[in-house]
Image (cartoon, grey):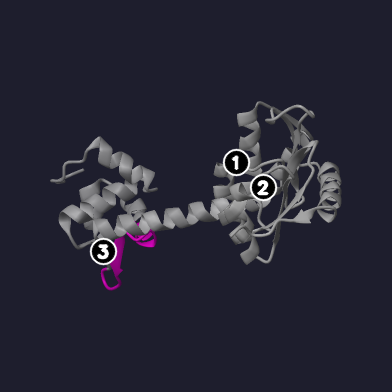
Amino acid sequence: MQGMSLIISDKLVRAFRRLGLTDYEMRAYLALLDRGESIASEISEKSDIPVSKIYDTLNSLADKGWVLIERGRPTRYKPQSPKIAAENTKNKIEQELTEYVNIIVQELNSIYERRNEKEKPELWIIRGEENLWKHIRDVIGRATHHLSIALPYIPKDMQLILLPIASLIKERGGTIQVLVGEDLDHQSIKKLCEEIEVRTRDISFGGGVISDSSEVVLILMGAREKRPTLGIYSAHLGLTSLARAYFDMLWATSNPVKSAK
């Protein structure tokens, strides 16, 4: 570019291009920045942009917020502050990207979810005590309005998770029911009994957790087993409905645990 005193780095060129400026637009803006307020022919000469292209280039820069136009005879052009121009362009790009993201999500997410539902296995076999408790904690953590728990005992760390979740469910007008084994020391669930309706009953099969009637973890335990090591996870409507009905039967034949003082 003739008479240009600015030093243009490759990094600066790449930055202009990433912000959506063409080569002509970049050269015209830099010529204005170097020269100051000018008319079109002066910018054309300084930037080596053909006169036939300079007006379209300057009008495009004005639309993008990089050039200010003073109408008159002749029309004069001023460079916008690089900070203001770059920030305006960034905001426009972010707004456009947000709109594109919303379009993609709105039009494609339902397709993905339908496909994901089709491919989701109906049952997961869970092995190992630690893995089983992890799945139970996850299911409890996803509950929003209804949570039903039937377990021979409730570990301390799970009680700590359960209390704030129970509080949120009750705030939303939901329900939380906890059923524990007859042999459980009530003192061990003292805090739980103060915040949640807890009942007791013989639970010989193992137990389970039902979250919002949409997913369930069933614990399978033999008569002589003291700790759970095998379970089933499912989000299948038929199985969760069956588990819900069975839990309701257990709950109806259970005894309330009074809050320990």
Query: Which residue corresponds to mark 1?
Result: 155
Among the two numbered marks 2 and 3 on one chain, the one whose residue lies closer to the N terminus: 3
Residue 63 sits inside the magenta stretch: yes
At numbered mark 3, what does the secondary structure look like: helix, strand or loop?
Answer: strand
In three-dimensional space, the C-alpha distance between marks 1 and 2, rounded to whole angstroms, equals 38 Å
Relative depth, front residue between 145 and 230? 230
Q: How many marks?
A: 3
Check the image and name the residue furthest to the bottom. 72
Asked if residue 14 is positioned above or below residue 129 in the image, the reply reads below
Disc 3, disc 1: CB below 8 Å?
A: no
Query: Which residue corresponds to mark 2?
Result: 109
At numbered mark 1, what does the secondary structure look like: helix, strand or loop?
Answer: loop
At label 2, counting other C-alpha atoms closer than 10 Å, the crowd grade (few under 14, some 14-19, many 20 or more) is few
In three-dimensional space, the C-alpha distance between marks 3 and 1, rounded to whole angstroms, equals 74 Å
Residue 175, by quadrant, is bottom right
Look at the image and give the residue range highlighted in magenta.
Answer: 58-74
Residue 45 visible in this rendered orientation of the protein: no
Q: The disc labelled 2 sits on which kind of residue?
A: Asn
Q: Position of residue 13 (x, y in %)?
A: 29, 40
Identity of the residue drawn at 86% across and 51% down? 249
Q: Is residue 7 left or right of residue 115?
A: left
Query: Which residue corresponds to mark 3?
Result: 77
Among the two numbered marks 1 and 2 on one chain, the one whose residue lies closer to the N terminus: 2
